[in-house]
């Protein structure tokens, strides 16, 4: 098929499409309303639920801070609470930034550039979270044991380290491998989109 | 005329544009409906900002193409399933087998192009001048020309392979 034939074919199709009347007045108005109603549900459900769980855990630690009666338990408690507040806030912020690209004013080139940059930032935050979870796994354990069981893990004779660390490590490694692969693919596709601009 | 009436008239007059853009940027009828609805919503949202400096269709191409790019960026999962029922015309028209076959080949090959190339070739096939394409996409006029030359060759090569 030569270019002239492609153009003729497109024009023929265009003539048909331009004369079709799919939309009624009601349908157009419904479309605008429908989207408006569903707007909130678009803000990532899973990340929001995860953030709420983290905030509840952080509040739980902060409310019981007085039970953490040594400097190292207090330090691990504050770190865990800080982590549980900060990371979800940063992830949610990156999602909001991703969703606030001005597609109404930008041209195609700006849209692609903005989206790709913000998407890469979002993916970086997600990846950072995966790595920091390993740190949280160690740091939060003494806090959890102290608050749940009243024991100081550093002083009491306990075997919790022996089973908790391996189980959590296996779980986290599997989860991280899945997450890393997933985000790497997304990151690559975001990078490809940006490359298209240079092409 | 109220804002609502003006919007409805403008959309009805140009609904073919939305149809063609969604056809190129989606891979299934459901996805196409979802994108179609999203474009109408975005156009409504920004209708106030349309100052009439450019042609309505030029503004519409820009918003629709940007929305399509944003749609790709959402990833493969359907974030907002369409609950509204409307039928999109089946292109190619089955009454003309030869045209149908050729159109389906053309669509398949346009879909193989990347997001930027799809937008450029669509605007070109729609008869837009290099200047209009440059305004819509943000590329310079010369760059539009160079890119289109490459895309045309690529498309020709793909189809005739």
Image (tube, rainbow, N blue to C red):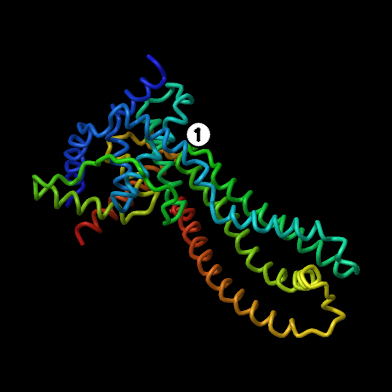
Q: Residue at x 85, y 65 (%)?
A: A75
Question: x, y percentage for residue A82?
Answer: 76, 58
Q: Residue at x 44, y 50 (%)?
A: B79
Residue B73, percent from left and from top: 46, 51
Q: Report whether A199 appears left or right of B106.
A: right
Visible residue check, residue B135: no
Residue in the foreground of this view, choosing between A144 and A98 = A144
Question: From the viewer's perspective, is residue B36 above or below residue A148?
Answer: above
Q: Is residue A72 above or below residue B36?
A: below
Judge by depth and name the residue closer to the eye, B106 or B2: B2
The residue closer to the viewer here, A12 or A85, is A85
Give coordinates of residue B110: x percent, y percent.
28, 51
Is residue B106 visible in the rendered image? The answer is yes
- Residue drawn 46% across and 58% down? A192
Q: Which residue is mark 1?
A: A105
Q: Residue visible at 67% across and 53% down?
A: A90
The chain letter under disc 1 is: A
- Spot the residue most to the front: A149
């Amino acid at each position: 098929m030569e270019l002239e034939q492609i153009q003729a074919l497109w024009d023929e199709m265009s003539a048909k499409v331009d004369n079709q009347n799919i939309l009624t007045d009601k349908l157009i108005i419904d479309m605008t309303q429908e989207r408006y109603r569903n707007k909130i549900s678009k803000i990532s459900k899973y990340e929001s639920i995860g953030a709420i769980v983290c905030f509840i855990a952080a509040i739980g630690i902060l409310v019981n801070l007085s039970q953490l009666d040594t400097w190292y338990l207090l330090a691990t408690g504050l770190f865990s609470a800080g982590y549980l507040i900060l990371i979800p806030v940063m992830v949610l912020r990156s999602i909001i930034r991703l969703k606030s690209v001005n597609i109404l004013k930008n041209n195609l080139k700006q849209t692609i550039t903005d989206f790709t940059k913000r998407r890469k930032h979002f993916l970086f935050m997600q990846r950072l979270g995966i790595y920091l979870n390993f740190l949280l796994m160690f740091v939060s354990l003494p806090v959890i044991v102290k608050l749940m069981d009243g024991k100081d893990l550093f002083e009491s004779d306990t075997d919790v380290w022996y089973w908790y660390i391996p189980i959590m490590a296996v779980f986290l490694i599997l989860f991280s491998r899945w997450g890393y692969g997933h985000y790497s693919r997304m990151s690559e596709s975001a990078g490809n989109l940006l490359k298209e601009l240079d092409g | 005329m109220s804002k609502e009436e003006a919007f409805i008239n403008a959309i009805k007059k140009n609904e073919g544009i939305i149809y063609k853009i969604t056809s190129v940027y989606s891979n299934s009828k459901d996805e196409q409906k979802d994108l179609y609805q999203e474009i109408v919503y975005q156009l409504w949202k920004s209708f106030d900002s349309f100052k009439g400096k450019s042609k309505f269709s030029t503004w519409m191409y820009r918003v629709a193409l940007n929305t399509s790019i944003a749609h790709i960026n959402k990833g493969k999962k359907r974030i907002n399933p369409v609950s509204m029922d409307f039928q999109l015309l089946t292109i190619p028209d089955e009454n003309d087998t030869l045209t149908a076959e050729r159109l389906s080949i053309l669509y398949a090959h346009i879909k193989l192009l990347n997001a930027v190339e799809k937008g450029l070739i669509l605007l070109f096939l729609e008869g837009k001048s290099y200047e209009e394409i440059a305004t819509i996409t943000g590329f310079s006029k010369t760059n539009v020309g160079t890119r289109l030359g490459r895309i045309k060759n690529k498309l020709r090569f793909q189809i005739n392979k």
